[in-house]
Every structure is written in structure tokens, then in C-alpha cells.
Image (cartoon, helix red, strand yellow):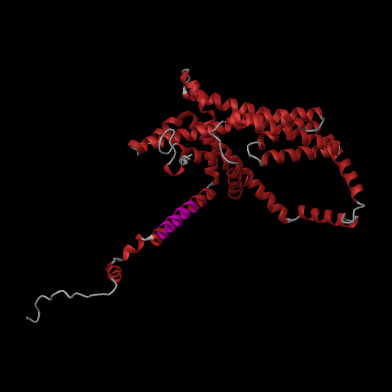
């Protein structure tokens, strides 16, 4: 046999054949078993969470742009039916946009003027009643064992006076001026973006859809249409429900002769855009004003009026006006409110529910106009025999 000739393969006999199979496996085959698939899913989940955290970080860093952009999209979705109606009647896009914006500004300006007028007209009376109510409360609470003494009250007043005259309060006031400037800038940007969304919204969306083809194009169009539909239905439905709530509570406050009935009703309208929590806060504020101005019996009647209006809204009005576009479970709403408030404060709580509704609406049309994504479809229950 030659020294460097071909060698014959050696046959190694093992008592356990599975050992040979495991030895011959490639390293990447370790990802094919159950534990490997779990590791792959874990890595994918980590990547998704990292991307989501990055997006949230960018949004929080650019709130001066992202918040006006989202608000403009929501308002444009709410005004979309009016814009379509005017365009169908031959009204030019620029003129229809100006009519919509000027009408909105006129309504908001008139409402703001009514609030300022009502507060100025009744503020002196409410302030005097609040002083009397606080004096009666202090006289009643002095007999309690935990009520602070007069020296303690004077010390607290001195501390508050020192704070308001300190440099710390001055820096806070300067920060407040900066916040007002940011608000004005964001409002101007909101109006500008809203103008272009109303005027050229369909053309902008068609431009964004250019890279898509075939089924992807159809899906992207379904997603866009569903987003506009859900956002518009949410704003219009919530506004209608909030208006009915505000009118009902306004009538109740007028009957009970509670001061600042109009500003409180407007506050009810605004807070109604925060589901569950908003109605509670508005009711508490109205009851506090009634307690300070008219006493605890009147405050109890105000609480009864608020509860009655909220029950009528939740059981009869909201299901009719909101329809199925906002069909979210109360648990989902509470979680969305919590996450939105943690990320964006009050504005985050207001935007959390419509954004969640949009996400669920997109899932419902992912595979077709009435066909949800595969993982979100209802499973058929097995038929019972006998």
C-alpha cells in the first residue's frame, strides 16, 4: 500500500446511534429545536422593543413638531366629510379650507369670549363666597385635634411668601414664559399643518403610496382610509357626547344657581375627551365650586346631576354616536390612558385612546376590507355533539 495513497474510510461503530447524529449536526442547527426558536423570538422581541423605545425617544425629543402633526391629522380627519362635501359641490380646495378654518376659529373664539365674560362677571361674588366658606370651615375645623394652630398657619404663609419672592420662583416664571412661547409656536405650526392637510391631504397620501404595488398598495390604502375614518369618528362622536354632557350639566348648574356655570360646562366639554377620568374630574370641580359657594347640600345635588348625565351618556348616547369605531374594552382604555399619561402627560392621555383605536382598526382591515389579521381572527368554537 503506498505511503500517501488514498485512505479507506474508517467505520466507527457506536453503541448509541443518536450520539453520531448529534456529532454530525451543524452549529446553526441548534436554532432549529424548541429552545432555539424561543431564543429567536426573544431576540426579535428585544429588537422590536428597542425600535419602539427609539421611536418614543425621538417623539419625546421633537414634541414641538410631533404633537402639532398628530393633532393636525386628527382635526383634518374630523373635517374630512365637510371637505369632501364642499369639493363635490365644486368649491375650490383653498376656499373650502379657509371656510373650515375660519368657522372653527370663530366658534372657538366665541366660546373663549363667553368663558372670559362669565368668569369676570361672577368672579367677585365667587371670591367673596369662597372667603366666607373658608372662614366657616376654619372655625369648624379648629376644634379638631389635628387642625394646625394659628402660629403654624402664619408660619406656612411666611414660607409661601418667601417662595414667591425667591429666585427659584423667578426661574420658574422664566420657564413658564418659555413654555408659553413653545405653545404659541406649536399652535402656529398646528394651524399651518392643518391648512395643508385640509387643502392637499389626498394628494399627500397618494404621494406616500407611490412605493407600494399590488396587495401592499391595497393594504396601505385600507390602512389610510381606516385611520381617517376612526380618527374622524372619534373626534365627531366625542365632541357630540361632550356637548350633550356640557349642556345637561350647564342646565343643572343653572337650576341649582351654582356660580361659573358656563366655564364649568366648558370644562366638562374639554375633559370629556379623556375617557373615564375626565368626567370624574369635571364632576369633582363642579361639586367643589358648589360646596364653596352654596354649601354641602347644593354640592350633593351637583354630584347627583353629574352622575345622572354621565349614566345617560354612557348607556344611551355614547353607543349610538360613537358606533363600533371605538369598540375598545374598558381595560384597554385604562391601560392606554395610563401609558399615554406616563409618556405625554395630559395631552398623552387625550391622544392615547384614539391612537389605540386606530391601531386596532388597522388590525381589523389588515388582510381585507372586513378581514382582520390572521392572529386577530376569532377562532371557531367546536360544535357540541348531543
User: Is 79 situated above or below 355?
Assistant: above
Q: Residue furthest front?
A: 386
User: Is 376 situated above or below 312?
Assistant: below
Q: Position of residue 260 (x, y in %)?
A: 78, 33
Q: Is residue 168 left or right of residue 332?
A: right
Is 375 one of the magenta-colored residues? Answer: no
Of residues 330 and 88, the one drawn nearer to the viewer in this rendering:
330
User: Is 281 situated above or below 242?
Assistant: below
Q: Position of residue 328 (x, y in %)?
A: 56, 39
Of residues 331 and 80, the one drawn nearer to the viewer in this rendering:
331
Location of the N terminus by quadrant is bottom left
Of residues 98 and 370, the one drawn nearer to the viewer in this rendering:
370
Residue 233 visible in the picture: yes
Residue 127 visible in the picture: no
Q: Is residue 270 left or right of residue 355?
A: right
Quarter of the figure with residue 115: top right
What main secondary structure does the magenta stretch of the protein show?
A: helix
Q: Position of residue 230 (x, y in %)?
A: 52, 34
Q: Residue at x 67, y 33 (%)?
A: 269
Q: Position of residue 94 (x, y in %)?
A: 48, 25
Bounds of the magenta segment: 38-53
Q: Residue at x 83, y 39 (%)?
A: 291
Q: Is residue 191 left or right of residue 305?
A: left
Q: Residue furthest top?
A: 89
Amino acid at each position: 500500500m503506498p505511503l500517501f495513497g488514498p485512505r479507506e474510510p474508517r467505520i466507527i461503530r457506536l453503541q448509541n446511534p443518536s450520539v453520531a447524529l448529534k456529532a454530525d449536526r451543524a452549529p446553526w442547527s441548534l436554532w432549529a429545536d424548541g429552545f432555539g426558536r424561543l431564543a429567536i423570538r426573544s431576540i426579535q422581541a428585544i429588537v422590536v422593543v428597542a425600535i419602539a423605545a427609539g421611536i418614543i425617544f425621538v417623539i419625546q425629543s421633537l414634541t414641538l413638531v410631533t404633537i402639532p402633526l398628530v393633532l393636525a391629522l386628527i382635526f383634518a380627519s374630523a373635517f374630512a366629510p365637510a371637505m369632501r362635501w364642499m369639493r363635490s359641490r365644486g368649491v375650490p380646495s383653498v376656499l373650502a379650507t379657509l371656510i373650515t378654518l375660519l368657522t372653527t376659529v370663530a366658534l372657538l373664539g366665541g366660546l373663549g369670549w363667553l368663558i372670559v365674560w362669565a368668569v369676570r362677571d361672577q368672579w367677585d361674588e365667587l371670591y367673596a363666597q369662597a372667603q366666607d366658606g373658608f372662614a366657616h370651615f376654619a372655625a369648624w375645623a379648629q376644634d379638631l385635634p389635628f387642625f394646625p394652630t394659628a402660629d403654624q398657619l402664619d408660619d406656612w404663609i411666611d414660607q409661601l411668601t418667601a417662595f414667591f419672592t425667591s429666585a427659584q420662583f423667578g426661574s420658574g416664571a422664566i420657564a413658564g414664559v418659555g413654555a408659553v412661547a413653545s405653545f404659541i409656536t406649536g399652535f402656529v405650526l398646528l394651524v399651518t399643518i392643518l391648512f395643508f392637510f385640509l387643502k392637499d391631504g389626498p394628494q399627500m397620501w397618494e404621494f406616500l403610496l407611490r412605493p407600494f404595488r399590488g396587495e401592499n398598495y391595497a393594504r396601505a390604502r385600507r390602512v389610510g382610509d381606516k385611520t381617517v375614518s376612526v380618527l374622524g369618528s372619534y373626534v365627531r362622536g366625542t365632541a357630540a357626547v361632550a356637548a350633550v354632557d356640557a349642556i345637561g350639566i350647564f342646565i343643572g348648574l343653572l337650576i341649582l344657581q351654582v356660580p361659573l356655570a358656563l366655564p364649568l360646562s366648558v370644562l366638562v366639554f374639554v375633559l370629556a375627551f379623556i375617557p373615564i377620568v375626565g368626567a370624574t374630574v369635571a364632576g369633582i370641580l363642579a361639586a367643589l365650586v358648589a360646596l364653596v359657594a352654596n354649601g354641602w347640600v347644593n354640592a350633593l345635588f351637583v354630584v347627583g346631576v353629574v352622575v345622572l348625565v354621565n349614566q345617560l351618556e354612557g348607556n344611551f348616547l355614547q353607543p349610538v354616536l360613537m358606533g363600533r369605531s371605538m369598540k375598545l374594552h374598558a381595560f384597554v382604555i385604562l391601560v392606554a390612558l395610563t401609558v399615554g399619561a406616563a409618556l405625554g402627560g395630559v395631552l398623552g392621555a387625550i391622544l392615547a385612546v384614539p391612537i389605540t383605536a386606530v391601531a386596532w382598526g388597522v388590525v381589523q382591515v389588515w388582510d381585507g376590507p372586513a378581514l382582520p389579521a390572521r392572529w386577530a381572527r376569532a377562532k371557531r368554537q367546536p360544535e357540541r355533539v348531543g
